[in-house]
Amino acid sequence: MAAPEIDWFGHAIRRVSAIMLVLSLAGTLGAFAWRGWQWGTGFALGAVISWLNFRWLKLLTDALGGGRRPLRGSAVVLAFRYLLLGGGAYVILRFTSISLPGVLTGLFVAAAAVVGEILLELIYGRT
C-alpha cells in the first residue's frame, strides 16, 4: 500500500500565513504601546503591504510552477507593486503623520514569517 502524498508546500504556506498574522497583530499592538498611534498605524500598513506582496508572489509562483500559463499582466502587476509602494511612501511622508519607519518595519513581516517557518522546519521537520 502506498503512503499518502503530503502537500508540504501547502502546509508551509498556511503556516507562513498564520505566522504573518501573529507577527502583524503582535507588532501592531507593540508599536501602539511603545510609540503611539503613528507607529502602530504605520506598522499595520506595512504588514498589510507585506501580506499583499507575499500573496502576489505566491500567485506568480503558482502560475509558473503549476504548468499553466502566467496571466497576461503578470509583469505589469510585478512592476506595479513597486510603484504602489513608492507612491504609498510618498503619500505617507507628504500628507500624513503616519510613521514611515513604522511602515518600513511592518514590511519585514513576511520575511520574519519565512524565517520562522524555516526554524520550525529545522526543529520539527524530522518528526
Image (cartoon, grey):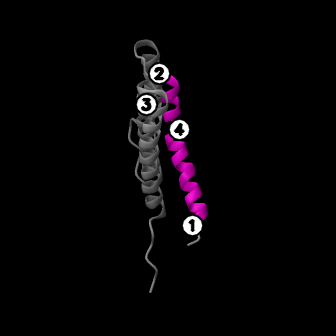
Location of mark 3 (residue): 40
- Please report contact status of discs 3 and 2: CB closer than 8 Å, yes or no: no
Q: Does the magenta run of residues contain 19?
A: no
Bin the neighbour count of mark 3 within 10 Å (Cα to Cα): few under 14, some 14-19, many 20 and up: many
- Going from N to C along the chain, the mark reached first, 3 or 4, is 3
- Going from N to C along the chain, the mark reached first, 1 or 2, is 2
What amino acid is labelled 1 in the image? Gly
| Residue 49 shows in this picture | yes
Q: x%, y% of residue 98? A: 43, 21
Farthest bottom residue in view? 1
Q: In whole angstroms, how far apart are the C-alphas of marks 3 and 2?
A: 16 Å
- Please report contact status of discs 4 and 1: CB closer than 8 Å, yes or no: no
Location of mark 2 (residue): 89
Tell me which segment is drawn in magenta: 100-125
Q: Nearer the viewer, mark 3 or mark 1?
A: 3
Question: Which residue occupies 42% across, 17% down?
Answer: 97
Question: Which residue occupies 41% across, 34% down?
Answer: 44
Q: Does the magenta run of residues contain 119?
A: yes
Say if 93 sits above or below 67 in the image. above
Q: Main secondary structure of the magenta part?
A: helix
Location of mark 4 (residue): 108
- Assign a secondary structure to mark 2: helix
